[in-house]
Image (cartoon, rainbow, N blue to C red):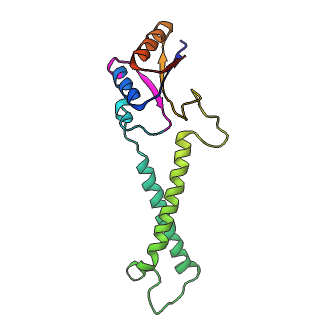
Amino acid sequence: MIKKQVLGIFDHEDTLLKAVKSLKAEGVKIKDVFSPYPIHGLDKALGLKDTRISICAFLYGMTGTILALTMMWYMMIHDWPMDIGGKPNFTFMKNLPAFIPITFEATVLCCAHGMVLTFYLRSKILPGVTPNVLHPRMSDDMMVMQLEAKDEAHATELINKLKTAGAVEITE
C-alpha cells in the first residue's frame, strides 16, 4: 500500500492554527507541521506531549558537577596533596567557597554542550545529513502541514479539506 503525501502551505499562523483545529475535529491525522518560527499553541493543537529534554539537561549538569568534584579531589588529594594552613585537604564545609566557581562552570559547560549535541541528534541536522525539505519556502515565510493519504480518493478528500481550511497552495 503506497501512501501519498499531501502538503498544505499556509501564509499566516492564525490560519494554520484554525486549520489544524478544524482538521483534527474532522478526524484528519496530521503527520507534521513545519514553520520558520515557533507558533504559540501549535503543540497543544497538534496534541503533542511535553518534551523530556529537561531530564537530559539535568543529567548533563550532574555529569559536569561530578566531573568537577572528581577533578578537584584528584588534584588536591591523590595527585599532589598539599598542607595549606593545617586545613583538611578535601572538606566541603571549610573549602566550599573555593569549590563553587569551578563546580558551577563545569556544570554549565557540560550541560550546554550536551544540550547542543542532543538538539542536533534529535533534530537530525548533523553535518553530512541531507535535510528533509518538503517545500522550498518552509524555512522562509510559509508554514507547511504534512498529511498522509491512503489512496487517490483520500488524497482528493484531503485536498478539498485543505482548500476549505485556508491553504494558499496545495501539493502532492
Does residue 126 appear to the left or right of 44 in the view shown?
right
Residue drawn at point x = 53 percent, y = 80 percent: 76
Expressed as whole percent of the image width and height from the top left, the position of residue 38 reads 44, 39
Q: Is residue 86 above or below residue 18?
A: below
Expressed as whole percent of the image width and height from the top left, the position of residue 17 reads 37, 29
Q: Is residue 66 above or below residue 164?
A: below
Q: How many marks?
A: 0
Expressed as whole percent of the image width and height from the top left, the position of residue 88 reads 44, 86
Q: Quadrant of the C terminus?
A: top right
Residue occupying the far left of the picture:
25
Residue drawn at point x = 56 percent, y = 30 percent: 137
Residue drawn at point x = 52 percent, y = 62 percent: 109
Question: Which image quadrant for residue 140?
Answer: top right
Q: Is residue 51 above or below residue 111?
A: above
35 falls in the magenta region: yes
Question: Is residue 69 shown to the viewer in this render?
Answer: no
Question: Which image quadrant for residue 92?
Answer: bottom left
6 falls in the magenta region: no
Question: Which image quadrant for residue 47?
Answer: top left
Residue occupying the far right of the picture:
128
Residue occupying the far bottom of the picture:
85
Question: Is residue 34 shown to the viewer in this render?
Answer: yes
Expressed as whole percent of the image width and height from the top left, the position of residue 168 reads 48, 21
Question: Viewer-proximal residue, 101 or 12?
Answer: 12
Question: Viewer-proximal residue, 147 or 165?
Answer: 165
User: What are the residue bounds of the magenta stretch?
Assistant: 24-36
